[in-house]
Image (cartoon, rainbow, N blue to C red):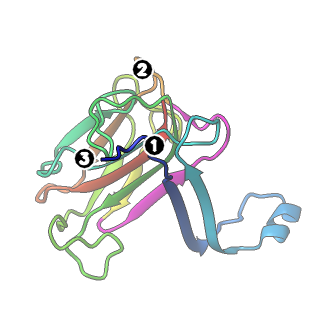
Amino acid sequence: MSSLTTISGGISISVSGQGTLNVAGLPAAIAGQIGSAYTNLQAQFSLGTAVSQVTEVAAFLVNGSGGIAASGNTTLLLAAGLTDICNQASITFAKIRGVMFILLSNVTTAIGYDSVNGTPCSGVSIGAAAVNPWTSILGATSVYKLNNGALWLHVDNSTAGLAVAAGSNEQLKFVNNDGANAAKVLMVVFGSN
């Protein structure tokens, strides 16, 4: 009987989107070159340890299957404590290449429609943790308001990525702005340790 000695393969992460770019505030020469419409923007990452590669991918419902209670909040540690898509617990991110949030909705026409997990929650605020806030996207005190069924995607494929530091730049707070309905936020993070 022969035995297996080598396994090889690859995983690719691709992020793409379409929409309208707000060119207000850009120098006229730059705004004229890029125009106001863009289509098929893409950022691709592969798994590996090189500067532009990703070593970890995590995808989960914030605060578990129960979500965030009406008027409630929860805080995540990005530097440790997340579980990756291979069910490896307590993964550590040193830099994040991309993060996506979807407030799952029970509205069938919403981008974030989910017939199982979706709720009528009106919105959540993301950011501004009281202790050691993750400042790489929003700074220490700003929040991003995510409405029902909406998606927020932030990708940074620069060498530096979005820094995460245990004990100083690691906490991400979620506040449910709805007083009557639980919020179920799907979060996907990909980065390196």
Q: What stretch is highlighted in magenta?
A: 148-163
Taking 112 as reference, is 14 left or right? Answer: right
Q: Classify 116 as above or below 176.
A: below
Give the camera-side residue of 189 and 121. 189
Q: Mark 3 points at which residue?
A: 62
At 32% across and 38% down in the image, what residue appears? 173
At 44% across and 46% down in the image, what residue appears? 7
Quadrant in which residue 44 is drawn: bottom right
Neighbor class of circle 3 (other Cα within 10 Å; few <14, some 14-19, many 20+) is: many
Label 3 amino acid? Answer: Val
Which residue is farthest bottom?
109
Marks 1 and 2, the one that precedes in the sequence = 1
Q: Which mark is residue 166?
A: 2
Q: Which of marks 3 and 1 is in front?
A: 1
At 20% across and 62% down in the image, what residue appears? 121
Label 2 amino acid? Answer: Ala
Discs 1, 2 touching: Cβ within 8 Å = no
Neighbor class of circle 1 (other Cα within 10 Å; few <14, some 14-19, many 20+) is: few
